[in-house]
Amino acid sequence: MTTALADRWRAARPPVAGVHLDSAACSRQSFAVIDAAAQHARHEAEVGGYVAAEAAAPVLEAGRTAVAALTGLDADDVLFTTGATDALDLLLGDWRGERTVACLPGEYGPNLAVLARHRFEVRRLPADSTGRLDVDAVAAFLDDDPPALVHLTMLGSHRGTVQPAGPLAAACRSAGIPLVVDAAQAFAHLDCATIGADAIYTSSRKWTAGPRGVGILAARPGLLSDEALAVLAHREVNLAAHVGLSLALGEHVAAGPELIHQRLVEVGAMTRSVLAGVAGWRVVERADEPSAITTLTPPDGADGRRLRERLIAEYRIVTTYAGVERAPDEMTTPALRVSPHVDVTADDLESLARALTEIGA
Ligand SMILES: *Cc1c(COP(=O)(O)O)cnc(C)c1O
């Protein structure tokens, strides 16, 4: 069943030049998504940008409906942004409450920068030694000195650890504190439909495999002010990219979000089993961590940045070098991130293992 999914996913895209193990950075778009965006640009040239926008309205509405199904929020409350960071920036810039927020120690570095720029005082949610939320301690933590807002990065950029978003949402609801979820890595990868968050945001280019430069913000009514929504309604946007994203969302829903999730869990386990202990690299995640993000810490003295470059130049294998700035309060060493999509094969992963061994030798 999952091989059929992998075959369809692969056949729907241009052939990959080498081995692509970098979906957490940017997945490969399908022919249909690329064509839809190009068609829209063409239509703009034919009939005018604003007339083409009206014609595209049903496609965009279908995209919002897909987001609603995937987040448990309402289609009317879905906005397209220029990315995940843009979504957070919009939310925080418009925040009318006290500027206190609780996050996990592994919070994404660029998010911490946005929080700081909006003058939020950041508190630490309780976590265990691997950085996972301590579900048993969270209710007391929120009760003790309640922050105005809780922000959760459900799956990090720097590590494949899946955070228990549902239990945190339940605790936030009991405490009457809004929960905002960064699902840049979780959306179209893990189940985000049953979290029960007040806002969920993500980017298009990662696991959804939509175009670059687009993102999604779904927020319960009232979280964004009418003034902010009015300003947003008049922002200039890349409609061709919104059309492409809507197509990608449709493809995701048609392929079966649960099937994709199950396959990505399988992919994560396979990646860790092939790469564990290769050439002195150490896998950070538990072998059965239910995500397709695997990170490896280098053997002593290895330069991860240079290694990533050599993997591309000499082996055509695309991965990410993740420096400690990705999660400055949690990471102590840089990591090589390996994030294949549903179509990865054991051969692909073995070629990475061979390359790591050869480069290490
Ligand atoms: C990539 C990423 C972001 C930023 O997404 P953009 O769309 O580039 O703004 C935010 N949070 C996490 C966890 C990410 O991985």
Image (cartoon, rainbow, N blue to C red):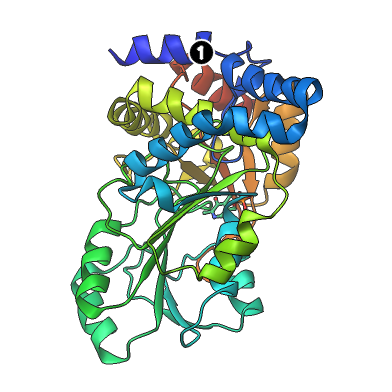
Q: Using the image as rendered, state which of residue 87 and residue 151 is in the foreground.
A: 87
Left or right: residue 103 versus residue 230 is left
Residue at position x 32%, y 91% from top? 145
Left or right: residue 321 versus residue 217 is right
The picture places residue 296, in percent across and down from the top left corner, at 52, 44
Q: Is residue 328 visible?
A: no
**Which residue in the protein does label 1 denote?**
10
Q: Is residue 234 visible?
A: yes
Left or right: residue 109 versus residue 181 is right
Above or below, 21 relative to 86: above
Which image quarter holds the C terminus? top right
Question: Residue 332 sits in which quadrant?
Answer: bottom right
Above or below, 166 relative to 136: above
The amino acid beneath tag 1 is Arg
The picture places residue 247, in percent across and down from the top left corner, at 52, 26
Crowding at mark 1 (Cα within 10 Å: few <14, some 14-19, many 20+): some
Q: Using the image as rendered, state which of residue 103 and residue 172 is in the foreground.
A: 172
The picture places residue 57, in percent across and down from the top left corner, at 55, 33
Which image quarter holds the N terminus? top left
Residue at position x 63%, y 12% from top? 14
Above or below, 121 relative to 257: below
Above or below, 282 relative to 341: below
Question: Residue 49 sits in which quadrant?
Answer: top right
Residue at position x 37%, y 61% from top? 220
Extreme residue toward the bottom, this view = 145
Question: Residue 75 sits in which quadrant?
Answer: top left
Q: Secondary structure at mark 1?
A: helix
Residue at position x 65%, y 30% from top? 318
The picture places residue 85, in percent across and down from the top left corner, at 61, 58
Q: Using the image as rendered, state which of residue 75 and residue 302 is in the foreground.
A: 75
